[in-house]
Amino acid sequence: MTNGKRMLLGSFFQTFLGHHLAAWRYPETKTEEVTKLSLYKEIAEISEEGKFDFLFLADVLAHNEEDIAYTPQIRLEATTTMAALASVTKDIGLVATLSTTFTHPYNVARQFATIDHLSGGRAAWNIVTTAHDHEAANFGLEEQLDHSLRYERADEFVQVTKKLWDSWEKDALLFDRENGIFLDEKKIHPIYHEGKYYKVRGPINIPRPPQGHPILVTASASEKGREFAAKHADILFTIAPSTVEEGKAVYNSIKQKVSAYGRNPEHFKIMPGIVPFVAKTEKEAREKFEQFQELILPQLGIGWLSRYVDHDLSQYSPDDHLPELKDVDQVNGEKGRFKLLSELAKERNYTIKELARYFVGTQGHLFIVGSGEQVADKLSEWFLNGAADGFNIKFPYFPGGVRDFVDHVIPVLQERGIVQTEYAGGNLRENLGLEYPVSQKLEV
């Protein structure tokens, strides 16, 4: 490995069949298996064959109604899916998404403690606050909570969840058959949390997870989100800037935030997303990408783009440029992606149709079309220049996109000594080089 460090890799998937929003139309995509365990099992098995550090399952809580007819928006519940995949994998980490806005700390603590135990210490929670009004409407709200308020609630939510994981001491279980003592009751503690948003007595009714705390992940490009990550998370999944130099500046800025919270920045991993169209040769990769682009219906691209720029673009000609948009400070959804798209449209002078086609293929992430060597070069450049600790790979289609990456990119990275060739055999926290969390002192 390079200076004792290795590049981390996440296998990112969603249950709409690929990162390219027209992926379901591609002949090699296993579209008919969208609700079947067989598809996700195959993704997991190929990812584990490629020695990815973890699977990362994204989730949202509603349909995007404007383009529901044109793209799969089926979302199997993330923790349930990962619990199922725990039984068909051995070493790979399992990252599931759950919202702090529309669930409760006690439920979340139990769900991830359960997955951590059943998987032998491979669970991770992708913490989201949920961004969109159409999601909030499914929980009795007219509109989503204010962006700042969501993060304020999330801060307390995570504190409570950690206390619940800490409510059992590590050695509470005795299993003393001879004397009939199952556990040491003095090593299980109520938490008596009473804060601004939550009142929880505790303790949890599941022993302390094998990792102490399951790995905490956040996915954000906003300043508020990055501040939250620096305080709480082990891994930040984010949108990469356009250049390595910009990426390095963002990387160093976030690491400084981590240090400011008294945390070791070496134990905080920054992993941008990357969308690779990869094949044996660059020519083959470009031909494949063009096939995907031809599958994009105008209604799909413009409907999806409207959601992220917070403006209905269907009322304009596809050949128009973006209308005047609100200021990013007025956006209550995904601020980071809004900022990226609005700035990109100005920089490249994109029409609505051009921006939509770009977004359908990449959704704003680092994007490369090429051979395995070329994709490996891009990842190596970012990693070796201190712009990332690793990457979440957002495959264009399933399961073939995973297979393309494992066959063409992984061997190159392994030959360069940048990624692992075997799993170390520990739990996920150990394998990622993260510290075991010290249990908080709780009231007896």
Image (tube, rainbow, N blue to C red):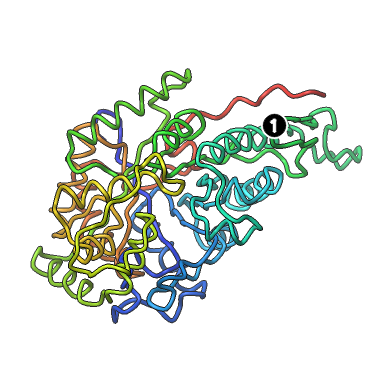
Q: Secondary structure at mark 1?
A: loop
Residue 411 versus residue 246 in the image, above or below:
below
Q: What amino acid does circle 1 point to?
A: Lys
Q: Position of residue 334 (x, y in %)?
A: 41, 48
Query: Residue at horizontal 21%, vertical 49%?
Result: 344
Q: Which residue is mark 1?
A: 196
323 left or right of 143 in image: left
398 left or right of 93 in image: left
Residue at the right extreme, as displayed = 179
In which quadrant will I find the C terminus?
top right
| Quadrant hosting residue 204 | top right
Query: Residue at horizontal 43%, vertical 50%?
Result: 54
In terms of depth relative to the viewer, which is nearer, 267 or 427?
267
Q: Position of residue 18 (x, y in %)?
A: 35, 67
In which quadrant will I find the N terminus?
top left
In terms of depth relative to the viewer, which is nearer, 245 or 432?
245
205 left or right of 66 in image: right
411 left or right of 61 in image: left
Instruction: Please state the total of marks drawn on the protein image.
Output: 1
In terms of depth relative to the viewer, which is nearer, 212 or 110?
110
Mark 1 neighbour density, 10 Å: few (under 14) some (14–19) many (20 or more): few
